[in-house]
Amino acid sequence: MKFFIGNWKMFGILSSKKIIEKINKFKTKDRSNNYKIIITPPYTLIESFAKKFKNSNVAIGAQNCFFKEKFSSNTGAISPFMIKKSGASYVIVGHSDNRAEGDNDEKLKLKLNFCLKLNLRVIFCIGENKKEKQKKITFKVLGKQLRNVLSKKFDPNKIIVAYEPVWSIGTGLVPKNKDLSKTINFIKSSLRKLYNYKCPPVLYGGSVDEKNINQLKNLKEIDGFLIGGASKSSKKFIDIIKNYYR
Ligand code: PEP
């Protein structure tokens, strides 16, 4: 089973549901391939979209959550409990945008813990930045990001790991297949060690589009894609899936 996840970032208003309607229509017709579609709109749209697409072929998730479970006096914060009550079933945790805004391993661990406790599935993002890549310490960085946040007691069936090199997000740059294959295999072997040979799906994210998917699809070890910019267009998002299975 492959995953195609659309991260809308800070885009989308109520009328953007048209994008998901088109994607759902496509997925409903396309029964020949085994894949799952998840869209993460901004918080403001979760409740209405989760209701609208409840029995559809598109699942709804959140892009982040606060590191406390339920209610607190933190202005502007949204908790895992609120997200669950809004009807979402997935939460992205550890996106590099949020790491840059202060999400450290300690906070990320709390976020994962509360999401999983509430039966929300977590899309956990990891990735090295440009400097770390140049210093050739990618595996060291990824190993630490995995070890410091993923606890043995977490259920690996509820976790999806997304490898998103920071230098690749929104830049049009994508790792070479040879390097990407090594990195995905490194992440998978680290996860197998942690979870006693069970391995959560490992996705790739960073500038995926309807063209470079034709190269990326050759790496069968990739369990799917986290798609930012291109997920704001139903056509591009659908073309990514079509080209993947072509
Ligand atoms: C992202 O922000 O998660 C992402 C993958 O963005 P983009 O596809 O635009 O690089």
Image: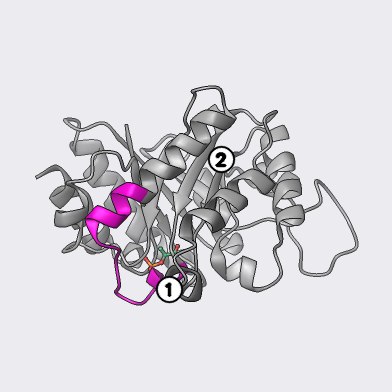
Mark linked to residue 89: 2
Residue located at (49% from left, 24% from top): 198
Q: How is the image coloured?
A: one colour
Circle 2: residue type: Ser
Of 190 and 68, nearer the camera is 190
**Which contiguous range is marked in magenta?**
166-182
Of 202 and 36, nearer the camera is 202
The x, y position of residue 92, in whole percent, is 56, 52
> Where is 139 relative to 57, above or below?
below
* Residue 112 belongs to the span the image colors magenta: no
Mark with earlier residue (2, 1)? 2
Say if residue 226 shows up in the picture.
no
The x, y position of residue 53, in whole percent, is 44, 43
Q: Quadrant of the C terminus?
A: top left
- Residue position marked by numbered label 1 in the rendering: 134
Image quadrant where residue 29 sits: top left
Observer-side mark, 2 or 1, equals 1
Q: Quadrant of the N terminus?
A: top left
* Residue 173 belongs to the span the image colors magenta: yes
Residue located at (54% from left, 55% from top): 140
Question: In the rendered structure, are the residues bearing label 2 and label 1 in contact, judged by CB atoms less than 8 Å apart?
Answer: no
